[in-house]
């Protein structure tokens, strides 16, 4: 005789409401964890960015003794804001001074879309002579090995010091020695042009404000 067939156990059905509640709870917990981690790390991230900015200002202004932040507020530049004004949301530049408290130049940060993503940079500028004092890329996601040379190629970065505005990009080796010319990086002309465009646009905007 054959053995009696055993009934196949059936799993109890889970209601749709329970599934929805479980997913909602998991989503809420994950969201709260993200908020907690963000609040926990935000001060450290902000402090790191501020330190990097201070170092960059020092580089493009050739190690000034000090600098002050000037905010563009209500149509004028000011170094002092009331407690009711959030300075983090205002445009600003940095005015550098030497050991004798003489003005040495402005550090101007600017950003525009690049080939891959937004390119952020800072440059030193002497408004009286129209000369650049230096340039440093703060953030870039340009193509590794090509576009990222705008921050890693010392020759490209170094040539901005002493150049006059408005800048003009030329193919490497084809310039005529003009003080406005910038030799672009071979194979990364788009990223090179982005840097030049950012600086020219930033100077055009801030020159009138600086006066």
Image: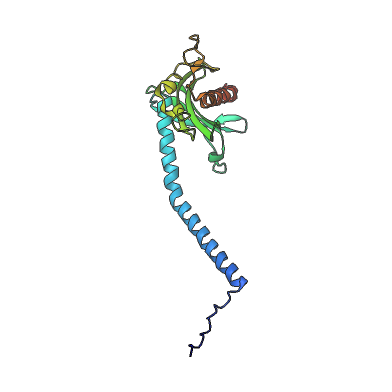
- Quadrant of the image occupied by residue 113: top right
Residue lying farthest to the bottom in this orientation: 1
Looking at the image, how many numbered discs can be counted on the residues? 0
Colour scheme shown: rainbow
Residue at 56% x, 34% y: name it: 91
In this picture, is 72 found above or below 173? below
- Residue at left 49%, top 17%? 182
Which residue is drawn at the image coordinates 49% and 21% (left, top)?
A: 125
Question: Is residue 102 visible to the viewer in this orientation of the structure?
Answer: no
Percent of width and height locating residue 80: 52, 35
What quarter of the picture does the C terminus occupy?
A: top right
Outermost residue toward the front? 1
Up the image or down, 109 lies above or below 40; here it is above
Q: Viewer-proximal residue, 8 or 151?
A: 8
Q: In the displayed image of the protein, which residue is found farthest to the top?
A: 176
Residue 55 in view: yes
In depth, the one of 31 and 115 nearer the eye is 115
Estimate the x, y position of residue 20 in percent, counting from the top left. Answer: 60, 67
Residue 53 sits in which quadrant? Answer: top left
Residue 6 on image: x %, y %: 51, 85
Residue 6 versus residue 143: which sits nearer the camera? Answer: 6
Location of residue 204 in the rendering, given as x and y in whole percent from the top left corner: 59, 22
């Amino acid at each position: 005789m054959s053995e009696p067939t055993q009934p196949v156990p059936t799993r109890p059905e889970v209601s749709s409401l329970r599934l929805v509640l479980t997913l909602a709870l998991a989503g809420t917990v994950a969201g709260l964890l993200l908020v907690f981690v963000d609040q926990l790390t935000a001060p450290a991230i902000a402090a790191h960015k501020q330190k990097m900015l201070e170092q960059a200002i020092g580089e493009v202004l050739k190690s000034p003794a000090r600098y002050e932040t000037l905010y563009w507020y209500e149509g004028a530049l000011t170094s002092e804001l009331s407690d009711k004004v959030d300075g983090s949301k205002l445009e600003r530049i940095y005015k550098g001074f030497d050991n004798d408290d003489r003005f040495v130049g402005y550090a101007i940060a600017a950003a525009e879309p690049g080939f891959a993503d937004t390119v952020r940079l800072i440059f030193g500028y002497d408004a009286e002579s129209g000369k650049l004092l230096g340039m440093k890329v703060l953030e870039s996601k340009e193509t590794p090995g090509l576009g990222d040379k705008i921050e890693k190629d010392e020759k490209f970065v170094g040539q901005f010091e002493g150049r006059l505005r408005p800048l003009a990009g030329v193919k490497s080796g084809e310039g005529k020695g003009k003080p406005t010319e910038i030799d672009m990086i071979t194979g990364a002309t788009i990223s090179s042009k982005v840097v030049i465009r950012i600086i020219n646009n930033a100077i055009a905007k801030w020159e009138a404000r600086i006066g």
